[in-house]
């Protein structure tokens, strides 16, 4: 059975862009594949971050994923730093990854501008991502559009490693991205991709009031200044969001009323808010239940890390052998006593 791996950073809230672009797909794929999902906390420390809240945000991300339908009976869910093999494989892959390839990554170029002195971790971020995927020898990776360049690099790294150490085999499969129709959800500013770092998101677990407060000022078709101006739904991000939260007949009605200047943007947003609130209500209810049981969530993550380590340990044994490392002798306690 093909194996799926994907990850999400706990660097902010789980937002509807993550959900529509990736997490909904994670849930569907559990039906037909062996799935491994990871909260990538090591990735989340590549920029400035708040160490006082990292642990809580990591658990909160796991809660969001479980509430969305990631099922620990059918998929492995774990935290990246609980499986140290990720860092080990990353180091080994670093040794075969050209710096030039890392420097041309779009996300690196964007994010590097935010630093006076760019941390090496930001440059090497995609190598850790390659390690995440290759450690489980995954075949398919459900992600949004913004990660496809990193996946292309992962395939290149796999190819290079296979050529040097694979002994003529494609020992690491070259993983392929799985995209959805919602592969690039725009933010509420209507200008950039919905993103935790841009503050243009709607949280998957936001309350009905928060959803409305965020949608109300959201940018629409810029040509529509007053309610009497006919709009072009295709140019409006709110219309695009309707397609994911409203039934088809409502989507058609929205388009008609926008073109005919019968509804103002606020009318259209109110309908979207109601449908979004109704769609997300069961997820929010499950998350509230899980928040009340942090011990249970930590146990799920503990079991997940144990399952992940079984696979990761196996991969690393082979990788070390194929790369020529001296095998560690089994520890003999008689040699370490000082009597
Ligand atoms: P992250 O945490 O930024 O996002 C998690 C997932 O959500 C998708 N996504 C979006 N999809 C559609 N529209 C958007 N506006 C949007 N914003 C985010 C992302 O594409 C991603 O699938 N580097 C990764 C995490 C990672 C990873 C991995 C992913 C680490 N290791 C291994 C796959 C495999 C990231 O920062 O995703």
Image: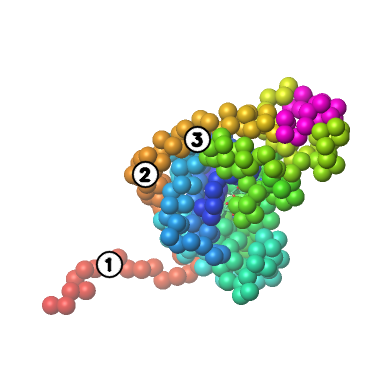
> Which of these two is toward me, 164 or 38?
38
Q: Is mark 3 within 8 Å of ligand 1?
A: no
Q: Residue at x 60, y 61 (%)?
A: 126
Image-based side of 32 in relation to 320, left or right: right
Report helix, strand or loop for mark 3.
helix
Q: Residue at x 69, y 56 (%)?
A: 149
Q: Nearer the viewer, mark 3 or mark 1?
A: 3
Residue 95 in sight here:
yes
Q: Name the residue under label 3.
A: 284
Q: Is residue 124 above or below residue 258?
A: below
Residue 335: % across, % down = 21, 74
Q: Is mark 2 within 8 Å of ligand 1?
A: no
Q: Which residue is drawn at 55% across and 45% down?
A: 14
Place residue 217 in its image quadrant: top right
Residue 63: % across, % down = 46, 42
User: Which range is magenta?
Assistant: 251-268
Task: Give the alpha-carbon distance from disc 3 to disc 1, as whole Å.
Answer: 49 Å
Mark 2 residue crowding within 10 angstroms, few (<14) / some (14–19) / many (20+): some
* Mark carried by residue 255: none
User: In which quadrant will I find the C terminus?
Assistant: bottom left
Place residue 122 in its image quadrant: bottom right
Residue 201: % across, % down = 63, 46
Q: Mark 2 points at which residue?
A: 294
Q: Nearer the viewer, mark 2 or mark 1?
A: 2
The disc, 3 or 2, on the residue closer to the chain's N-terminal end is 3
Q: Which residue is drawn at 54% across and 48% down?
A: 13
Mark 3 residue crowding within 10 angstroms, few (<14) / some (14–19) / many (20+): many
Q: Is residue 266 magenta?
A: yes
> Which of these two is toward me, 331 or 307?
307
């Amino acid at each position: 059975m093909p194996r799926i791996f994907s990850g999400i950073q706990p660097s902010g809230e789980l937002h509807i862009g993550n959900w529509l672009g990736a997490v909904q797909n994670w849930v569907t794929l559990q039906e037909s594949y062996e799935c491994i999902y990871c909260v990538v906390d090591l990735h989340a420390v590549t920029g400035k971050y708040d160490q006082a809240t990292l642990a809580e945000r990591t658990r909160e991300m796991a809660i969001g994923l479980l509430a969305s339908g990631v099922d620990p009976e059918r998929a492995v869910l774990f935290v990246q730093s609980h499986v140290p093999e990720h860092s080990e494989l990353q180091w080994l892959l670093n040794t075969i990854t050209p710096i030039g390839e890392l420097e041309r990554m779009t996300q690196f170029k964007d994010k590097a501008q935010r630093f006076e002195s760019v941390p090496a971790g930001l440059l090497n971020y995609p190598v850790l991502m390659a390690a995440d995927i290759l450690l489980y020898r995954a075949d398919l990776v459900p992600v949004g559009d913004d990660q496809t360049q990193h996946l292309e690099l992962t395939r290149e790294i796999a190819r290079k490693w296979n050529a040097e150490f694979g002994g003529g085999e494609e020992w690491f499969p070259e993983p392929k991205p799985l995209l959805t129709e919602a592969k690039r959800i725009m933010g509420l500013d209507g200008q950039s991709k919905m993103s935790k770092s841009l503050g243009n998101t709607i949280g998957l677990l936001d309350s009905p009031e928060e959803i409305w407060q965020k949608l109300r000022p959201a940018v629409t078709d810029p040509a529509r200044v007053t309610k009497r101006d006919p709009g072009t739904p295709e140019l409006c991000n709110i219309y695009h969001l309707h397609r994911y939260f409203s039934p088809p007949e409502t989507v058609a009605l929205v388009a008609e009323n926008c073109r005919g200047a019968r509804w103002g943007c606020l009318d259209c947003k109110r309908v979207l808010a109601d449908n979004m609130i109704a769609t997300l209500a069961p997820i929010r209810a499950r998350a509230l239940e899980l928040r009340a049981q942090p011990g249970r969530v930590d146990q799920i993550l503990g079991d997940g890390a144990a399952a992940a380590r079984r696979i990761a340990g196996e991969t690393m044994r082979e990788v070390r052998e194929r790369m020529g490392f001296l095998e560690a002798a089994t520890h003999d306690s008689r040699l370490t006593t000082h009597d």
